[in-house]
Amino acid sequence: MAAWLNLKSFFKRKKNKNDEMAFPSTRGEKDRGIWGRILIAVALITILVFLLPSGQSLQFADLKEGSISPRRIVAPFSFEILKTREEYSRDRELAVRNLYPVFRRENLYAEQTFEQLDGFWSQINQTRRQFLTLHGGPRRVALDSLKSKFPISAINEVNWQILTDPKGSLNYDAYQSLQSQTRQSLRDLFGVGILNKQKGELENPDRRITLIEQNDEIISAIDDFYDLVEARARALEMLNAANPEEEFFTQIIFAVESYFIRSNIFYDEVENAARIEETQSRVPLSSGFVYEDEKIVDRNERITPEIRKKLVSLSSKIAEKGMHEGGIRVILPFIGKIGFVTALIFVFVVFIYLEKREILYSTKYVLLLSIIILLIATTSFLSHRLEVSEYFAPVAVGAMLLASIFNMQLAFAGTAILSLLVGAIWGNEFNLMAVSFFTGVVGILVIKRVRTRGQLVQAVFYMIGAQVLAITMLGLLRYLPIRQIVVDWQFGALNGLFTPIVAYGILALIESVFDITTDFALLELSNLNHPLLKRLSVEAPGTYHHSILVGNLAEAAAQAVNANSLLARVGCYYHDIGKLEKSEYFVENQMGSENPHNKLAPSMSALILSNHVKKGIDLASKYKLPKAIRDIMEQHHGKSVMAFFYQKALNKKLAEEVNETDYRYPGPLPQSKEAAIVMLADSIEAASRTLKEPTHSRLKGLIEDLVDERFQAGELDQSPLTLRDLQRIKESFLIILAGIFHARVEYPEIEESKGSTKGMIKKDGE
């Protein structure tokens, strides 16, 4: 009830002091983006509802092939046994395979061919008459004109001369015989019929075709006709038989005939498509019948493929009867889907509200969460529709993304929600839910430890192992044969292979689009060769050294309070980059030279010091540092007073003439654990260097005083640190500082002597 009241107040968006203190960075967005976040949630639920399976009851979804039925199931009414999708597809293919391809004989093409052949001989006759009077160049022009009209590549130059020269070796009788044989050979080929498809392309077990000629339709053997290759071969065979001793004569006839051979029997694509569609539509959807009160499966009986078909058929029939009955029963399944999806999202929202509620105040994060959920759900839906193995479901990708962007607790909850959702999309697949949750958890544990490319390769092997192990355990639990389990391994292994790679790629895209800071981005920024850090080491070496030490302190403290230690360390590296502009005005960079602040008014000195925060933000934006780092830079001084210059101003003027606000940093106060830790580490590291004798007790006292001072000044009010966290932070600071200022052994002086080392050793490490 308390959680419900909290959520109710959240959706009403009533402001209260505690909320404003806890999440000031999202204060403006709380009210501005509420309708946008509600719209995103409604859109998410709507899309997920339509991704769930429809058209069948899911009450038998848990009874898979190979499992043991926990109950006796009897047919409540008579129904047909529906074929599986594979069986129906196979029967449709068999029905089509028994169809004969349809061809049409088009005699018009033969008539047109003979007209073109007559035109060819007419042109040859005309050229032969011209050649009686033409010689030299004019004859060549006439021959070229003929060749351009009939580009018969098979007739070489010599044969063209023979055809067109009336005084050559081709006399009148031979010429007439050539024309006659060409026409007769073509007439014989067209009479048999020439197909416009190669016979090898026609897949038909009976090697028959349906031939339509005018209004008649006959079934004929494919071998009763020629294709184009066979027609040319047959023409050459007939010519060789008719002219056994006149090879050149045969060559000329065959060259001319080959040019004019064409198909006169054509494949009718439209008619074939229509007959295929009609035949497939007549394939029955059912393969049997179950009568009312007939036993389908007994208790403790194994589910066989035939029993599974009956259960699926009964499930579909129950859904169909509900649709036909009308009324409220028509929408009950839809209401159930809405309720299921809404319940999942509601539970997830409650968890986020109790664990990390600032996510719900950000439209950006709500949108990102919705995109991740939709990405996994849609991919699973498409895999199911394409009949890909269920072990390709990418729940582990979603788990890795959630762990990298948010935290492990939210990732665990998200993995549970995604596993239930994906299982529902696949039809209440329990084994898929179990495998998805197990591999998702492994993915969370793996991705949080990936720091290098080598570890990314290790993550691939871990994910493959997790997939194979989960598939094996679930397979043995379901009494599946070892052969089936081994087959499923390959799908799980492929999923495990691509999961870390895909998650890493999507993560890079999310970082760019949403300005999200992940551990992978922080690892890149932790490289000390980054241009900003290189500049800092050269132009402000004291600040650079200070930042590295502060990073060590912050990292240890963050680990102690379960904060993001990597973010704390990297934030320290960059927190003072604003000092690059006037590095000589900061004491750690003065190296014994005169302090320039001695010549400045306290107010000007305070302005220079406070300005390094603004300059740092400008540099961070220029170098595209992520928002999480910029927030730490902006908040690491909070609104603390620059005590030295404030006191200096008080010494010069009356107290009422000095405005304390002028000597405070602009803020805001630290909003996160990491920013608060950086603030404390920064001040403590700087103060520790002022101790003349940094003993363990003095370091402890210094840490206690500075942390308590910041706490009492209200500098930590807007951070989520607790008193227990502060105690752990103090302890971790003390351990690190004690290591830095460890006691050194003082060695006795060594007099120079012959053969000895010159000089003397004073202290270890100097």
Image (cartoon, rainbow, N blue to C red):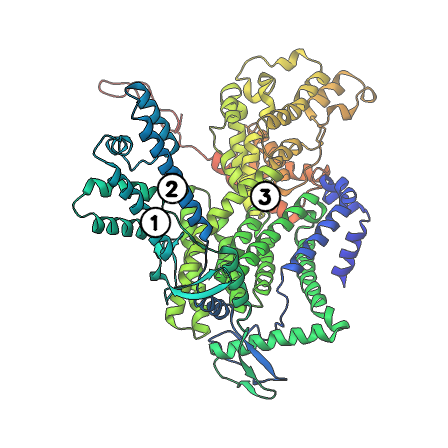
Label tally: 3
Name the residue at the top extreme: 599
Q: Give, as a three-letter code, the residue at label 3.
A: Ile
Name the residue at the bottom extreme: 293
Quadrant housing the N terminus:
bottom right
Q: Give, as a three-letter code, the residue at label 2.
A: Leu
Which residue matches tag 3? 729
N-terminal-most mark, 3 or 2: 2
Instruction: Give the image location of residue 649, x and y in percent.
Output: 74, 19
Q: Is residue 33 left or right of residue 117?
A: right
The residues tagged by marks 3 and 2 sit, at their Cα atoms, a distance apart of 102 Å
Circle on res. 256? none
Q: Nearer the viewer, mark 3 or mark 2?
A: 2
Instruction: Give the image location of residue 638, x and y in percent.
Output: 69, 33
User: Within the image, what quadrant is residue 53 found in?
Assistant: bottom right
Residues under numbered marks 1 and 3 in contact, where contact means CB atoms less than 8 Å apart: no
Quadrant housing the C terminus:
top left
Q: Give, as a three-letter code, the residue at label 1.
A: Leu
Circle on res. 117? 2
Check the image and report above or below for 704 versus 70.
Answer: above
Residues under numbered marks 2 and 1 in contact, where contact means CB atoms less than 8 Å apart: yes
In the image, 253 versus 135, the foreground residue is 135
User: Within the image, what quadrant is residue 654 found in?
Assistant: top right
Which residue matches tag 1? 186
Q: Secondary structure at mark 1?
A: helix
Q: Secondary structure at mark 3?
A: helix
